Amino acid sequence: MVDDRSAPDKRFLENIFKTDLHCHLGGSIRLETLVELADEQGVPLPSKNIEKLKKTISPSEFGSLEEYLAAFTTTESVLRDPSALERVAYEVCEDAAKENVIYLELRFGPTNYQTDDLSPQRVVSSVLEGMKRAEKEYPIRTGLILCGIRTELERTREAAELAVIFQGRGVVGFDLAGAERGHRPKDLMKAFTPVLKNFVPVTVHAGEGYGAKSIEEAINYLRADRIGHGTKIQENTKLYDYVNVRRIALEVCPTSNVQTQVVSSIGTHPMLRYFRDDLRVCINTDNRTISDTTITNELGKCSKHLGLTRGDIKSLVKAGVKAAFLQPSERTALLDRVDEQFEGL
Ligand SMILES: [Zn+2]
C-alpha cells in the first residue's frame, strides 16, 4: 500500500472513483457533437474547425463571469430538440463514467431550451432519458439538478415548479445560476417557493462573481444546502464557521474560477484553507467543454499546485459523496464502494 502522504500520480487519479456534483449540461457538450448537431440543424457556429472552436469557447481566461456565461450561447444553440438533449445528456454521463465518476449530478436551466414546439416538461424528460440510458450502460449513478436564472424571476419560478413535478423521478435538486452581481438571492425568494415548500434540496451559485453577502442570502432566504463555488466565503467569519458546523458543502470548480478571474491561479485558490479548516469541500468541473476539463484533471491540478497528497484527494472525493443529494442509504453504499477501492490501492 502506498503512503497516503505521497503525491498522487496520474494513474492513481485516473483509477480512483470520483464524483462531479457541479456540471452544467450546456457547457459540457462534446465539440464534435456540437459541430455535428449544428450541421444537422442548420445552426451557425463561429467555426466548424474543432481547434478554432475550442479557442473561442474555452479560452484560458474570460474577462468576467458574464463573458464566461456568454460562451453558453454557442454551446446551447443546438439543444433545441428532444433527441439532441437526450444525446448530449447521455454523452456527458458517458464521458464522466469513462473517467471513473461513479456519481454525477448534471444541471441545466430547462426554460433555456423550450421552444414553441418543445415544452419545458419534454426538455426535462429528454435529458433524463439520456441520463437513464447512460446508467444502464455504465456503472454510474446520476441525478439531475434544475437551474433557475438569477436575472429571470418568472423563468426561475417555472423551473422551480418543474423541479417539483420531476422530484423523485430523476430530479434531485434545484440551483440558482446566472450573473451574480446586482441580482440578490433575497429577490428570488418568491420564485423559490415551490422547491422550498416541497423540500427539494437546494444549491446556489454564490460567492463567485460577488462576495460573502450573496452566500449569506442563499442560506438565509433560499435555504441552500450547498453552495456553488463559495470562493469568497472567508469574508464573513461567522458565516464561515456556520457553513462548517452545518456541513454545507462548497462545490469548488478550480479551472472555472481561474477562467472567470475569481482567483488569479489554482495555486492561490482559497479552497486549500477551507479544506484544511475542515469545511466540506468537493471538487467539480463546472463545464467540461467550456473549462476544457475533467474531474481527473481538476484533482491533478489541485494536487500539483496546492501540494495535495493522496490522502487529501481521498478526503475530497469522499466529501463529494457525503454532499450528494441522495438518500443516506445510497450515500453510504457509495461511500463503502469508495472506501473499499481506496483500501485496495
Ligand atoms: Zn456553475
Image: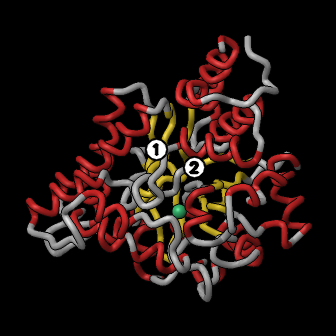
Q: Is residue 74 above or below residue 198?
A: below
Q: Is residue 66 above or below residue 168?
A: below
Image quarter for residue 113? bottom left
Residue nearest the viewer, comparing 249 with 67: 67
Whole-percent x, y for residue 164 in the image: 45, 58
Q: Quadrant of the C terminus?
A: top right
Whole-percent x, y for residue 311 in the image: 77, 29
Residue pointed to by mark 1: 143
Type of amino acid at the residue the image marks with label 2: Asn
Q: CA distance from mark 1 to mark 2?
A: 15 Å
The 10 Å Cα crowd at callout 1, few under 14, some 14 to 19, many 20 or more, is: many
Q: Earlier in the sequence, mark 1 or mark 2?
A: 1
User: What residue is drawn where x is 35% and y is 65%?
Assistant: 110
Q: Quadrant of the N terminus?
A: top right
Q: Is residue 163 visible?
A: no
In the drawing, what numbered circle is on residue 284?
2
**Quick check: 116 left or right of 50?**
left
User: What residue is drawn where x is 60% and y is 42%?
Assistant: 324
